[in-house]
């Protein structure tokens, strides 16, 4: 099956390549961009990319890669704690390659991925208590400084608008990563995840069309532009995956129902039937806003349908259909891997099916690894991939 083919590609081709070409062993951290020959392109080093690469190598080790994943994880953690974290738990957005310039603006997106990466590293390294203490300090800073009066988190303090659903989604991902591995009598991460799930179900999911858009006002009411609302099929799938996980963890049936509707919206209105891929954006009437098709929505489509194919609240016929749609999504992912096997990928497919010629973004590795991990649940004993 294609899920095993992609797993073999990840373990035998992609992870070794990115270990060799994507790790900056001179200055620390990871390269943001590579050209098609594998040479790094100068760019700021962002906290979110550092965190994503920590996750990729953590998960790679759990999926069976026998390379030096623990050393690379520690390399990333060292760069993160020395250059991108402050003692009070606040996160620096980015630093220059030589570390002489920093961008210390706040963005909840960075907090989400740093917390997420620490959860991944805690699964892999023998220092869970140390990493969780760090994660709680970061989460404490986030909650004490940028919590929204009702749900979720602000974009800045003092407030800037619009509020965005995407960072909230990734915070749910981070909180779930910790909550799913925490003792049942420890509710810190569970309560944090519950707050974002409540935001999604009570504010973000539209009562008109059951979709989640990208931009909101200060009261979490949708905000449109000259083209209407921005609804991204990839995020309908991603929210579906996360709300399904929340429903499994909490028993919240309403979250499952919303998740299923979100995935159906993404599939029914966000897939180009000719290219068989998820497009970038539609509006509130489900008309096309952006017909280009980035790589990451394909991975989120696979994750959403896979979890729905396994969900106990789904009926048998729906689970069978979700299995077929998972395979369709994985075929979509495969289209972006250069020549079907190279350890690098294309980022954006045009409406005519060709790809934009551009550098390879290391940040997309997270999406690929997460999708492969979702459809091939990690096995710490795996050695025969």
Image (cartoon, rainbow, N blue to C red):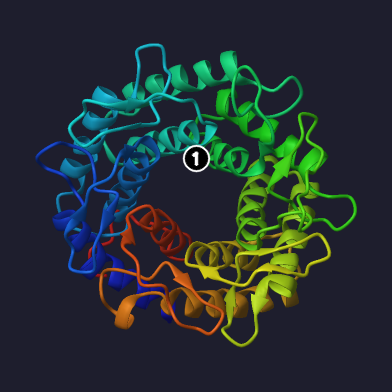
At which x and y percent is residue 97?
A: 21, 37
Which residue position holds label 1? 177
Left or right of residue 126, residue 105 in this image: right
Whether residue 242 is situated above or below residue 136 in the rendered picture: below
Whether residue 341 is situated above or below residue 108 in the rendered picture: below
| Residue 247 visible in this rendered orientation of the protein | yes
The image quarter containing residue 65 is: bottom left
Q: Residue at x 31, y 43 (%)?
A: 54
Left or right of residue 67, residue 145 in this image: right
Q: Which residue reaches farthest front?
A: 226
The image quarter containing residue 28 is: top left
| Residue 320 visible in this rendered orientation of the protein | no
Query: The N terminus appears in which quarter of the rendering?
Result: bottom left
Q: Which residue reaches farthest right?
A: 208
At which x and y percent is residue 317?
A: 74, 77
Query: The C terminus appears in which quarter of the rendering?
Result: bottom left
Q: Nearer the viewer, residue 65 or 97?
A: 97
Q: Secondary structure at mark 1?
A: helix
At which x and y percent is residue 66?
A: 17, 57
Q: Residue at x 68, y 48 (%)?
A: 214
At label 1, counting other C-alpha atoms closer than 10 Å, the crowd grade (few under 14, some 14-19, many 20 or more) is: many
Q: Nearer the viewer, residue 239 or 45?
A: 45
Whether residue 115 is situated above or below residue 345 in the rendered picture: above
Q: Residue at x 71, y 57 (%)?
A: 231
Q: Nearer the viewer, residue 279 or 249?
A: 279
Left or right of residue 164, residue 58 in this image: left
Q: Which residue reaches farthest left?
A: 26
Q: Residue at x 22, y 29 (%)?
A: 78
Whether residue 165 is situated above or below residue 334 in the rendered picture: above
């Amino acid at each position: 099956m294609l899920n095993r083919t992609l797993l073999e590609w990840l373990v035998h081709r992609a992870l070794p390549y990115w270990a060799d070409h994507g790790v900056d062993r001179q200055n620390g951290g990871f390269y943001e961009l590579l050209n098609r020959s594998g040479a790094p392109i100068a760019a700021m080093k962002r906290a979110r990319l550092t965190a994503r690469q920590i996750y990729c190598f953590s998960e790679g080790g759990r999926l069976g890669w026998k390379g030096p994943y623990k050393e690379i994880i520690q390399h990333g953690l060292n760069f993160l704690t020395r250059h991108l974290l402050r003692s009070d738990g606040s996160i620096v957005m980015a630093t220059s390659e030589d570390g002489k310039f920093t961008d210390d603006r706040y963005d909840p997106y960075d907090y989400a991925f740093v917390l997420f990466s620490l959860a991944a590293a805690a699964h892999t390294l023998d220092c869970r208590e140390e990493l969780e203490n760090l994660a709680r300090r970061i989460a404490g800073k986030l909650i004490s400084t940028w919590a929204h009066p009702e749900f979720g988190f602000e974009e800045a303090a003092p407030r800037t608008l619009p509020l965005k659903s995407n960072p909230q989604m990734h915070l749910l991902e981070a909180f779930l990563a910790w909550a799913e591995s925490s003792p049942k009598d420890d509710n810190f991460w569970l309560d944090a995840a519950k707050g974002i799930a409540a935001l999604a179900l009570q504010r973000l999911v539209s009562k008109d069309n059951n979709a989640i858009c990208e931009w909101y006002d200060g009261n979490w009411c949708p905000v449109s532009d000259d083209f209407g609302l921005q609804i991204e099929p990839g995020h309908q799938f991603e929210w579906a995956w996360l709300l399904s996980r929340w429903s499994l963890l909490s028993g919240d049936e309403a979250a499952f129902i919303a998740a299923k509707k979100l995935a159906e919206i993404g599939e029914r209105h966000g897939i180009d039937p000719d290219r068989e891929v998820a497009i970038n954006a539609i509006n509130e009437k489900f008309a096309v806003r952006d017909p280009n098709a980035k790589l990451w929505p394909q991975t989120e489509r696979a994750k959403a349908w896979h979890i729905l194919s396994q969900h106990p609240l789904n009926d048998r016929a729906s689970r069978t259909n979700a299995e077929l749609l998972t395979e369709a999504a994985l075929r979509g992912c495969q289209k972006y891997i250069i020549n079907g096997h190279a350890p690098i990928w294309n980022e954006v497919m045009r409406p005519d099916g060709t790809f934009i010629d551009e550098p390879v973004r290391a940040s997309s590795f997270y999406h690929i690894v997460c999708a492969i991990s979702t459809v091939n649940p990690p096995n710490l004993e795996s050695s025969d991939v």
